[in-house]
Each structure stands twice: as C-alpha cells, then as structure tokens.
Image: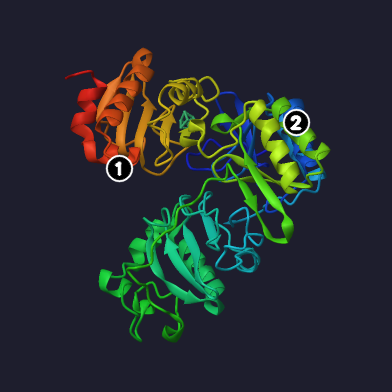
Amino acid sequence: MTALPLTMQRGACPALSAPMMTGDGLLARISLVEAISPAQLADICRLALKHGNGMIDISARGNLQIRGLSKTSAPHLDADVRAMNLPLREGLAVEIPPLAGMDESEIADPRPLADAIREASHDITGLAPKMAVVVDGGGVLRHSDLLADIRLVAVGKHNWKLVLGSTEDKGFVFNVLRETLVVDTVIGLLKQLKGLGNKARGRDLARDLSVSETQLHTPPSSSGLSRKSTGVVTIDPSQMLGTSPSMTTRNAGSPFDLFALSDHLHAIGIGPAFGQARAEELIAVCDEATRLGIKSVKPALDHSLLFFGSENACRSLQDFAGDNGFVTSSTDPRGHIAACSGSPACNSATIATHEIAAKAAAECGDLLDGSFRLHVTGCPKGCAHPQPAALALCGTADRVSLIAQGKAADQPFAFASFADTNATLRRLADLVRSERRPSENSAACLARIGSDRLAAAATGRP
Ligand code: SF4
C-alpha cells in the first residue's frame, strides 16, 4: 500500500486519498456526485468503525468525513471505499442542489450543465484545492448560502446568472448568459484562475475583471467584458443579457423537511446534531431506511442526509430518526447552529463546541428562530461557517470572543470567560427577547441592537 500525501495546508480539502491531520487523527473526505443506497452508507459507516474512530461528519456542503484515521489505516479506508464502486467525485467540485432534476419548482434542471462543466474541466489542473463551481436550478433547496468561486443560477429556462465568489447575494454578478455560452465561459474563467496560481479564488477574478457598477446594471456594449486586459474570457455581446437590480436571491430553504418530488417520490431530510454522528447511530438509521424500502440517500447541504422513498416510508424514517436524537425538523434549534468539531476532536480548538451548542439549543431556543445561524467555533479559522454570521462565539487561547455580523476572525464586540460562555449567550438571548419588535426576527433584531448594546448585555452591564 503506497503512502498517502498527507496535508496540513490551511485551506486544503481532506480528500479521500489525501487526508488531513486534525486533533483526533487523520480525516478523509468522501464526496459523492449521486445518491447511494442506505446499505452502502451503512457500509461506509462500518469502514469508519474499522479504520477510524467511528465518528462521521456530514459537512455543510454535504460531504462525508471519516475521522480518527491513522497513517496506517487511511490507505486501507481509501482502498476499501474505492472497492465499493461508489459515484465518487474526482477533480473539480461542481455542485448541484440535492433535489436537482426531481424538484418541480426548479426553474431549470442544472444537471446537464454541471455534467458538461465537469467533463470540460477535466484537464484543468493547478486550481485552488477548495475551488467550487455551483450550478443551481433555483428549486426549493438552494445552494445560495454556500461559498462558490463560480456560481450559475437559473433565472430563466435557458438563462443563467453567473456570480463570482462568496455567497449568491454577496458575490460579484458577472452577467446573465444564454445557456449555449455557459460552459465555454466557465471554462474560460477556470483557465483564467489557473493562470493566477493555485491560491486564486473566484473573488480574485471578480477584482481582476473589475466591471464598473454601471456595467453591472446595463447590457454591455459591443466592447463588453472582453476589453479588460486579462482577455481570457471573450464573449459574444449578443449572448450577454446584462443584469438587473431586481434580480433577487431566494432563500436557501431547510433540508430538514419532507419534500414531495416528481413521479410520486418523496424525500426526508434528517441530520445528526451539529453535523457529527457515531457510526453506529447512522447504521441504525440506514438499516431502518432499508427495512422501510427506501432505495437511496444523499448527503446534502447543512449537514443533512436526504433519504428518497414513498411518503409513508419517509414519514416513518423521520419518526425513527427523531426518536434517536437526529434533527428532523426545520424548527429544531440545533439545526440553526453551525458548530465545528471543536475540542477534543480538533487540535486547534480551545472550546468544546458541541457541548456549548447543545446548551445553547436547550436554553436559547427563541433566539435561534432560523433567521440566522449561530456560529460556535473552536478557533478563528471558522471551518463550520466561513461566511459572516449575525452572532459567533469563537474560542481563543484564553477566552471566548463574541462577534456580531462577521466572520470568526473579525473584531469581537465582547469576550467571555470559558466558564461563562453559555451564561453570556443567555444574556444576549434575553436582550433580544425583550427588544424584539412585532414581526421582527432575531437576525434583524441583533443587527438593529448593534455591537455596543450587545457588548453591554454580554458583560452584564446595565
Ligand atoms: S474551526 Fe474548529 S474544526 Fe476548524 S480548525 Fe478551528 S477548531 Fe478545528
């Protein structure tokens, strides 16, 4: 068995064949491009018990992560998973929403474009390890909150909005393109990123293209975007539809629900609390799904698993999973917390994120109304929620920092001692409860209250 290329590089992805060192050993990622059977997922869990420490993460992007591997066991996991002939993703991450092609509310089916981009990008090497292309057909479950270097969003049956960097609403709107132009444009952008080096991301390209605000909101002239000095992306102006200020982003939607799909199929979304489960717990759910006649399952966004079957089977599995401690409802406060593995699983963590998050869910349910995701992170890297959050708790060397409307590494508005973390959060929740206006949600209330008053409440000052 050949040695694996281990990586400790910040920003790198712990792929199946290149696991990453964490606090509880090596972590390997299994990325699937299609659904698998519940029996196959149970087999992956058994491999996690055999080769790792039996802990499995479902990442925010819907990847499986096997934890607690050793240098000796990781190659065996790699070989055993590959022997299962699963639909593994190799190469560039080209991601589509989990209900793509089955969701009758979709504006357009993103699968053909995603397949074409995967195929055409096959030989483009040297991109940033976390490079991601999202192709979003605009259905009930969206990828709008996931970071993407290049994002395509259906805005008509054959028209796609192309956004560079960030989330859908914060990214740089490159243009709206006719479908016939999309693959060549994306490949051109990827080649441009390759030319900028293996650290370049979509946001760098956005800066490089530097289209003026005026150009963003008016159909481009014949000189168009290709007049920029970079010159790699050359688009026939007649194919560019311009952008409109009225083009709004629809909510991503919660996967923790029952979905009626085409052809009388249903899907139920369930997930382990804070995205992490013991293999035995997942095996029990998979075995029950198999017993109920459920044929397929997909790891999906927001640390969920979507099981596909009849309505009755899905409802029964929802009950079973709920009885066994899984998140099964969009109103479960645990589903509104993004917590990384934290201590002791991760070497970099200074706080037990899952413990803090579980207490927060139990004590601050009204704060966690689904309008924002509370970010609980073991260190400023912020793995569980790279985007800004309305409120974040971040472990540092000697205390916990509290950040409002920002990323984990941003300037804190206050600090709490390790022991006082949950009590501090309760004080903030009390403030939001007392200040909330009729029909105002927690996110809006937090933003309106502002950092100064949050800091006063956090420290218990009157
Ligand atoms: S954010 Fe959490 S999981 Fe990521 S490195 Fe820091 S402590 Fe570890």
Location of residue 393 (image quadrant): top left
| Sequence order check, earlier mark of 1 and 2 | 2
- Name the residue at the top extreme: 419
- Say if 282 sits above or below 229 in the image: above
Left or right: 220, with 57 as reference point: left
Residue toward you, 6 or 117: 117
User: At which x and y percent is residue 328?
Assistant: 60, 36
- The residue that disc 1 covers is 444
User: At which x and y percent is residue 252?
Assistant: 48, 51
Rendered residue at 61%/66% (across/down): 109
Please state which amino acid type lies under the numbered disc 1. Answer: Ala
Please state which amino acid type lies under the numbered disc 2. Answer: Ile
Question: How many C-alpha atoms fall within 10 Å of the one at disc 2: few (<14), some, or many (≥20)?
Answer: many
Residue toward you, 215 or 203: 215
Rendered residue at 26%/34% (across/down): 411
- The residue that disc 2 covers is 283
Badge 2 element: helix
Badge 1 element: helix
> Where is the N terminus found, in terms of image quarters?
top right
Rendered residue at 37%/12% (across/down): 419
Left or right: 257, with 453 as reference point: right
- Name the residue at the left extreme: 462
